[in-house]
């Protein structure tokens, strides 16, 4: 079947249904030049909310799109439609709407949750992290933003998340189990039972074949010994007491095997501190309070008194160094000297006071030292120390600090590479190569120029020109979009964008680009001549008897064209156009929406008049 064509019986139309029957893509939002109609928009929003609650997401998208058509300035409509797209796992579209929501209402935290969620599922973890952080600046206590940031940070470094979605079966993690045992004495007892631990590890290993298999094994083992559930969940970092409460209903009838009876009420552990240690901790508490009040001199005195009472505990020295860091860079050397001395004496300290240089305390000392090097921008040394801290105590706080440091280092290196003067030199060399028709060489120079000055719009435009000559049209369009993001009034970018779309046979998009350029500069020669060339090509192809397969493929890949073809009003018009061309002509003349839709379909090659 060919696109619309006319036969001997008059101007009849035939649609390229074989391509139009593809699934609905992103409905492109068309902004009305008229004033927003908030009443109609509100009605459409209400319908969209009802459809969303019924989980009819395509229908909800339709209503929210209509709401946007009536009022494109309301950020809530884009937020709601983004949620619908995310529910359908159409994350590119969800991201587009989330970004527009943030643009319209940058002080609305929920917009950042929409945008960040889409970036997360598109595996744009750095972008998601930045988005969630921006949202948290507006709402520091927002639980959704906090959870999103944690998940994005974990996903970037392939760290399994325990907040949901990953199942309960992962690798056996002795560190997680040991940490849980500190909080739950029962687990410490379970870890002494070799048979129990062997069973738990076997279940974890066999569960790697699939979650369903793991759950079945776990349920079977629970019927024999419910302690296995506690151990397996502890391996995953799940709160044991909460897990027991959740599963209590299934365990009510279970009679555990005989084991050593535990007291009904656990007595608080005896305070084994010496009088000196108790006094030292009192001084530390006073020091902490003074530190929070920024009374640094007085805080130092308290920490010194604490270390005099108990010289074999890293906490007092580490806290004292925290004060020094706050007092300024002139104290950094003292911090490093003091803490390195304590690291060197850790075994001596532990012998004199068991636990005075525990793994956790040593890890905090390494982290404190890393923070000093981080402030000095000695990133490699700071990274080395954070990694040492993780070998002592692998905890989320240190992992996050390490990730942030690595990102900071990357940004610092990029910033250090920036040099507008050298960027200009590379641009001029690129221009010379371009004039010599050495387009690949020109692109390499423009690449370097962009790295040196990524905020200069003309560099992206120049590189797009080279890419167009190299027939890399999609890459050229990406550069032109970036150029226009930096400078929306860059007319030459619109002319080059029109040319790229023209060569891709996306004539409807080429017209849009040239029109935007002409709106900015009505006398621009390149845009005016480019538009005339496109109109001539559209006229030629619409009258041709041959169908341009490439043009149709490009058109049907365009969300805006698909949206038009899936519009019930447009479909009704196309049917009328086939059956009663004169009536269709009258309807089109009376409806500007139909006129615009038909023009786009003709430009895209879907409707033909020849």
Image: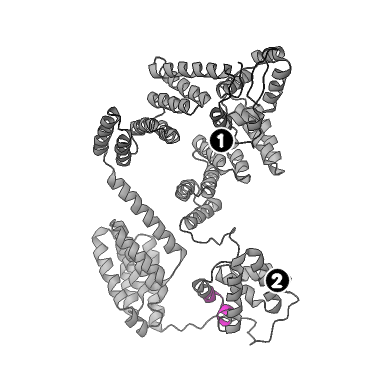
Image position of 131 (left or right of 21): left
Residue depicted at x 43% and y 59%: 400
Q: Position of residue 567 (x, y in %)?
A: 66, 28
Q: In this orientation, which residue lies closer to the viewer: 426 or 79?
A: 426
Which segment did they paint magenta?
180-189
- Element type at mark 1: helix
**Residue 279 counted in the magenta span:** no
Q: Is residue 342 above or below residue 453?
A: below
Number of the label disc, if any, that sits on residue 248? 2
Q: Position of residue 331 (x, y in %)?
A: 25, 62
Q: Is residue 78 above or below residue 338?
A: above
Quarter of the picture containing the C terminus is top right
Q: Is residue 125 above or below residue 446?
A: below
- Element type at mark 2: helix
Q: Quadrant of residue 267?
A: bottom right
Q: Earlier in the sequence, mark 2 or mark 1?
A: 1
Q: Circle 1 is placed at which residue position?
A: 75
């Amino acid at each position: 079947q060919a696109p619309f064509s006319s036969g001997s019986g008059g101007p009849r139309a035939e649609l390229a249904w074989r391509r139009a029957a593809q699934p609905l893509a992103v409905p492109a939002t068309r902004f009305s030049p008229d004033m927003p109609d908030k009443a109609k928009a509100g009605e459409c929003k209400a319908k969209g909310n009802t459809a969303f609650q019924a989980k009819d997401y395509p229908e909800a998208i339709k209503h929210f799109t209509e709401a946007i058509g009536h009022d494109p300035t309301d950020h809530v409509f884009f937020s709601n439609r983004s949620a619908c797209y995310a529910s359908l796992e159409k994350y590119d579209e969800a991201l587009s709407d989330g970004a527009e929501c943030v643009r319209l209402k940058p002080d609305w935290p929920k917009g950042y949750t929409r945008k960040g969620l889409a970036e997360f599922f598109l595996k744009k973890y750095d972008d998601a992290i930045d988005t969630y952080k921006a949202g948290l600046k507006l709402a520091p206590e927002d639980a959704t933003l906090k959870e999103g940031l944690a998940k994005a940070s974990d996903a970037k470094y392939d760290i399994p998340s325990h907040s949901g979605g990953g199942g309960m079966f992962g690798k056996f993690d002795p560190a997680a189990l040991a940490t849980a045992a500190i909080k739950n004495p029962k687990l410490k007892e379970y870890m002494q039972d070799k048979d129990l631990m062997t069973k738990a590890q076997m279940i974890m290993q066999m569960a790697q074949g699939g979650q369903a298999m793991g759950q079945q094994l776990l349920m079977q083992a629970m019927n024999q010994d419910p302690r296995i559930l506690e151990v397996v969940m502890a391996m995953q970092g799940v709160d044991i007491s909460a897990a027991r409460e959740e599963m209590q209903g299934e365990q009510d009838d279970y009679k555990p095997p005989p084991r050593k009876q535990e007291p009904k009420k656990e007595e608080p552990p005896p305070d084994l501190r010496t009088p000196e240690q108790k006094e030292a901790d009192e001084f530390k508490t006073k020091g902490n309070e003074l530190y929070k009040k920024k009374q640094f001199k007085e805080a130092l005195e308290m920490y010194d008194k604490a270390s005099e009472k108990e010289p074999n505990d890293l906490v007092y020295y580490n806290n004292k160094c925290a004060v020094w860091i706050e007092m300024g860079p002139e104290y950094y050397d003292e911090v490093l000297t003091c803490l390195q001395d304590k690291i060197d004496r850790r075994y001596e300290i532990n012998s004199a006071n068991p636990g005075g240089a525990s793994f956790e305390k040593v890890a905090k000392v390494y982290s404190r030292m890393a923070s000093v090097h981080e402030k000095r921008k000695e990133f490699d040394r700071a990274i080395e120390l954070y990694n040492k801290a993780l070998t002592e105590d692998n905890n989320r706080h240190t992992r996050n600090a390490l990730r942030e440091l690595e990102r900071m280092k990357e940004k610092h290196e990029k910033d250090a590479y920036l040099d507008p003067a050298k960027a200009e030199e590379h641009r001029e060399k690129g221009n010379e190569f371009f004039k010599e028709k050495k387009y690949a060489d020109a692109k390499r120079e423009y690449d370097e120029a962009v790295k040196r000055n990524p905020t200069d719009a003309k560099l992206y435009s120049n590189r797009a020109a080279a890419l167009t000559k190299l027939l890399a049209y999609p890459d050229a369009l990406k550069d032109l979009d970036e150029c226009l993001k930096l400078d929306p009034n860059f007319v030459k970018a619109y002319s080059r964008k029109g040319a790229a779309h023209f060569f891709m046979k996306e004539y409807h998009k080429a017209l849009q680009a040239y029109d935007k350029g002409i709106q900015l500069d009505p006398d621009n020669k390149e845009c005016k001549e480019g538009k005339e060339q496109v109109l001539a090509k559209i006229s030629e192809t619409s009258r041709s008897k041959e169908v341009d397969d490439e043009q149709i493929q490009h058109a049907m890949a365009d969300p805006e064209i698909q949206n038009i073809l899936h519009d019930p009003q447009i479909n009704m018009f196309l049917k009328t156009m086939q059956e009663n061309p004169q009536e269709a002509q009258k309807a089109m003349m009376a409806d500007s929406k139909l006129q615009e839709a038909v023009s786009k379909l003709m430009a895209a090659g879907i409707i033909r008049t020849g």
